[in-house]
Image: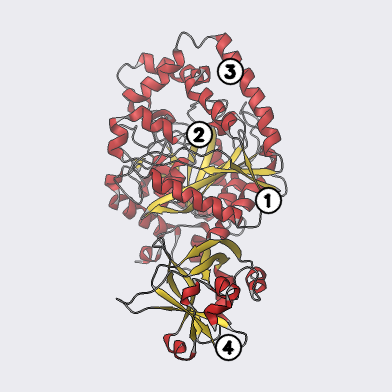
C-alpha cells in the first residue's frame, strides 16, 4: 500500500520528490489524507471533509497538465469554508447560510490551474469573526499539538489541517489576524500579503475593504510558491490591486517595540520568556536594531472593533442575521450587532477614517526600509477558558494583529521556538506593501538565527583573550556573563599557552560557582568549533547557576592531577588579574 509511504509533513518539495521517484501517486496522497482526517474526526477540522468522491475530478484533471510546467502539480490544499469551490457547499460555519457556488473563488481557480488539488472545506469561527477557533456550530477545532488548547481562528481548520498532515498548504482569510494567529498556535508559517494583492472574489466578506486571503504552510518556500501562483490583479474584483513583488533584500533596520508588552493566559510567563529569547536572537544576529514606540499601532487596532469601522461587518451581514433569527452563533451575533450601534454614525466613521489616515502616514515613515517584529500572540487559552469568557479572551488574541490590514501592511508569521512543551510561540514580521518581498528574506534570516547553540566559555575564548577572534570569526555573538552552578572546580592546565580546565566535582562533593561567558553560534559553526578543541578539553554540558544547562568547555578529570587548582579565583579572568590564585 503505497499511501503508507506518504510523509506526515506534506511539503511541496517532499511531494514533488515522491512523485518523481514513484514512491507514491496523487491518489496515494489523497488516500493518506482521507485516512488521517478520519483519524482526527473528533478534532473538528473539517466542515466538508476530504473524500475521494469530491476530489477524484481534480485528480483526473492532472492528466491534462504537465508536471514540469505546472508548479503545484498534485499538491493538496485545504480551503477555509468562506472561500468558494465550485459545487462544494460554502457555509461560513453557519448552516442556514449555506449555498453551492457555481464557480471557484479567484484564488482557488488560479491554484487549480497550477495543478493543485482542493481536498475539503475547513472549519472556522463563524463568518470569520473570531481569533479562537471555538465559534462554530461544527465544533471547537482542537489545537494540533495540545487538544485542550485553542487552535486559533478564524482560520482554525485550515491551520490544523496542515499541522496534522492533511494538506500541504491551506487557504485562510485575514481581517484582524485570522491568517496569523492559528499559524503561531500550531507551529506554522502564516503569510498575509498586502491588501488586494491576492483577489478576494468568491470570498464571503468580513470587512470587504481590508479582507485578505492568506496561506498556511510548513515553511517559507511553500508560502512563496503559493504566492507566485495566485498574486495578481483581477479586473472584475473592485478591491483587487496590482501589487507585484519587488526584488527581495534584507531590511536595513529591524524594529522592536520599546515598551514592555502585555502577555496573558495560563502561559503568560512562558510566552514572555519566549519573546525575550526571540528578541535576543534578533539582537545577536548582526542586524541593525532600533526600538520604537508602537502605541500608534494599538490605537489603530482599537478602531477595528471598538470604533465605527466595525460597522462594515454589519453592513455585509445584517440582512442575513436579521432575516434568520436564532441561526447565528450567539457570540458572533453580539460582535456583528455591535456595528449597528446608534452612536456609530457617519460623522464618527469619518473621524475614525481621518485619524486612521494620520496613523498610516506615520507608519509609512516608521517602516520605510525596515521590518517590524512583534509576538504574533501574547498568550493562549484553554478551550474551556474561552468558552467561559468568549469575548474578553478573543479580544486579547488580537492585541498584536488587529492593526495590520487597517494600516495596509504586509505580514508573515513564523515559528519562534516553543514557550513550553508542545506550546509553540511565534513572531510576526510586518512591512510596507512595496517592501513585502523583504519579509521572507528577513524571516529566513531569523529562522536561521533560531537554529543556534549557546556555548559557555571559561578561558581563552572569552572577550579580550587570545582566542576571542576564533569565536567572532565563526560568527559567534557574545550573549552575557554568567556563572556555573556551585558544582565545579577550575584548574590552570600545564599547556602552552596556559588555559583553564573546568571540572565537575563528584556527586556529594563541594564545588564552587565559576564565572563563564555565554556565546551564541550557528549549528554549522558549532561543529567546526568543536572539531579543533584539543585534549584534555572538550565540549560537554555545563549547568548554570539558574539551573539551565548549555553546551560548554569541560575538562577530563585526569588532567587535574598535573594542574594547579585556581577555583578560589572564581574564574579565569579574575585569576589572570590576581596571580596569587595561580601560583
Which comes before the other along the chain, label 1 or label 2? 2
Mark 3 touches mark 2? (CB < 8 Å):
no
* Mark 3 and mark 4: Cα distance apart in space: 72 Å
Left or right: where does residue 406 sit relative to residue 76?
right
Q: Secondary structure at mark 3?
A: helix
How many residues crowd mark 3 within 10 Å: few (<14), some (14–19), many (20+)? Answer: some
| Rendered location of residue 204, percent (x, y) | 47, 28
Find residue 319 and report its image quarter. top left
Determine the CA span between mark 3 and mark 2: 37 Å
Most extreme residue toward the front is: 580
Disc 3 versus disc 1: distance between alpha carbons?
A: 34 Å
Q: Which residue is mark 2?
A: 103
Q: Position of residue 269 (x, y in %)?
A: 40, 46
Asked whether the beta carbons under mark 4 and mark 2 sit within 8 Å of each other, the answer is no
Given this view, does label 3 or label 2 mark the residue nearer the observer? 3
**Residue hosting label 1:** 288
Of 450 and 80, nearer the camera is: 450
Nearer the N terminus, badge 3 or badge 2?
2
Q: Residues within 10 Å of mark 1 (few under 14, many from 20)?
A: few
Decide: marks 3, 1 in contact (CB < 8 A)?
Answer: no
Numbered circle sitting on residue 495? 4
The earlier-in-sequence mark between 3 and 4 is 3
Q: Quadrant of the N terminus?
A: bottom left
Residue, disc 3: 352
Give the mark toward the camera: 3 or 1: 1
Residue 359 at what x, y percent from top left?
64, 26
Amino acid at each position: 500500500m503505497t499511501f503508507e509511504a506518504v510523509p506526515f509533513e506534506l511539503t511541496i518539495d517532499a511531494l514533488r520528490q515522491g512523485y518523481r521517484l514513484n514512491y507514491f501517486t496523487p491518489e496515494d496522497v489523497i488516500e493518506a489524507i482521507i485516512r488521517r482526517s478520519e483519524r482526527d474526526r473528533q478534532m473538528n477540522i473539517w466542515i466538508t471533509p476530504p473524500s475521494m468522491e469530491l476530489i477524484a475530478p481534480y485528480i483526473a484533471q492532472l492528466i491534462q497538465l504537465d508536471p514540469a510546467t505546472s508548479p503545484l502539480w498534485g499538491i493538496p490544499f485545504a480551503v477555509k469554508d468562506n472561500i468558494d469551490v465550485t459545487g462544494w457547499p460554502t457555509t461560513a460555519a453557519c448552516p442556514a447560510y449555506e449555498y453551492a457556488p457555481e464557480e471557484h473563488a479567484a484564488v482557488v481557480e488560479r491554484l487549480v490551474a497550477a495543478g493543485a488539488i482542493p481536498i475539503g472545506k475547513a472549519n472556522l469561527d463563524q463568518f470569520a469573526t473570531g481569533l479562537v477557533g471555538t465559534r462554530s456550530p461544527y465544533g471547537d477545532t482542537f489545537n494540533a499539538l495540545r487538544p485542550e488548547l485553542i487552535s486559533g481562528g478564524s482560520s482554525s481548520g485550515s491551520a490544523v489541517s496542515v499541522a496534522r498532515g492533511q494538506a500541504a498548504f491551506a487557504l485562510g482569510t485575514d481581517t484582524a489576524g485570522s491568517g496569523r494567529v492559528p499559524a503561531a498556535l500550531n507551529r506554522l508559517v502564516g503569510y498575509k500579503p498586502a491588501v488586494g494583492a491576492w483577489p478576494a472574489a468568491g470570498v464571503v466578506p468580513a470587512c470587504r475593504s481590508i479582507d485578505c486571503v492568506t496561506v498556511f504552510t510548513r515553511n517559507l518556500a511553500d508560502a512563496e510558491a503559493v504566492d507566485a501562483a495566485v498574486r495578481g490583479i483581477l479586473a472584475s474584483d473592485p478591491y483587487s490591486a496590482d501589487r507585484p513583488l519587488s526584488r527581495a533584500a534584507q531590511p536595513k533596520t529591524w524594529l522592536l517595540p520599546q515598551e514592555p508588552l502585555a502577555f496573558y493566559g495560563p502561559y503568560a510567563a512562558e510566552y514572555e520568556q519566549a519573546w525575550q529569547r526571540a528578541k535576543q536572537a534578533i539582537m545577536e544576529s548582526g542586524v541593525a536594531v532600533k526600538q520604537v514606540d508602537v502605541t500608534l499601532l494599538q490605537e489603530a487596532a482599537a478602531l477595528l472593533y471598538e470604533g465605527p469601522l466595525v460597522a462594515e461587518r454589519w453592513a455585509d451581514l445584517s440582512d442575513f442575521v436579521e432575516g434568520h433569527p436564532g441561526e447565528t452563533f450567539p457570540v458572533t451575533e453580539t460582535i456583528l450587532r455591535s456595528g449597528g450601534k446608534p452612536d456609530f454614525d457617519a460623522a464618527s466613521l469619518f473621524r475614525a477614517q481621518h485619524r486612521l489616515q494620520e496613523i498610516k502616514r506615520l507608519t509609512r515613515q516608521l517602516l520605510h526600509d525596515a521590518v517590524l517584529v512583534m509576538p504574533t500572540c501574547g498568550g493562549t487559552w484553554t478551550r474551556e477558558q474561552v468558552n467561559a469568557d468568549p469575548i474578553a479572551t478573543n479580544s486579547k488574541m488580537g492585541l498584536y494583529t488587529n492593526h495590520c490590514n487597517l494600516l495596509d501592511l504586509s505580514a508573515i508569521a513564523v515559528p519562534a521556538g516553543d514557550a513550553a512543551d508542545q506550546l509553540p510561540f511565534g513572531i510576526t514580521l510586518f512591512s510596507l506593501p512595496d517592501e513585502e518581498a523583504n519579509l521572507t528574506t528577513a524571516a529566513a534570516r531569523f529562522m536561521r538565527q533560531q537554529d543556534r547553540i549557546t556555548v559557555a566559555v571559561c578561558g581563552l575564548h572569552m572577550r579580550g583573550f587570545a582566542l576571542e577572534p576564533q569565536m567572532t570569526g565563526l560568527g559567534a555573538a557574545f550573549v552575557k556573563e554568567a556563572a556555573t552552578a556551585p558544582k565545579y572546580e577550575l584548574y590552570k592546565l600545564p599547556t602552552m599557552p596556559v588555559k583553564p580546565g573546568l571540572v565537575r566535582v563528584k556527586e556529594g562533593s563541594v564545588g564552587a560557582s565559576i564565572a563563564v561567558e555565554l556565546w551564541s553560534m550557528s549549528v554549522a559553526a558549532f561543529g567546526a568549533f568543536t572539531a579543533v578543541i584539543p585534549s584534555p578539553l572538550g565540549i560537554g554540558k555545563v549547568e548554570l547557576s539558574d539551573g539551565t544547562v548549555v553546551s560548554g568547555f569541560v575538562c577530563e578529570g585526569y588532567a587535574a592531577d598535573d594542574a594547579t587548582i585556581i577555583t578560589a579565583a572564581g574564574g579565569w579572568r579574575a585569576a589572570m588579574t590576581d596571580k596569587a590564585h595561580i601560583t
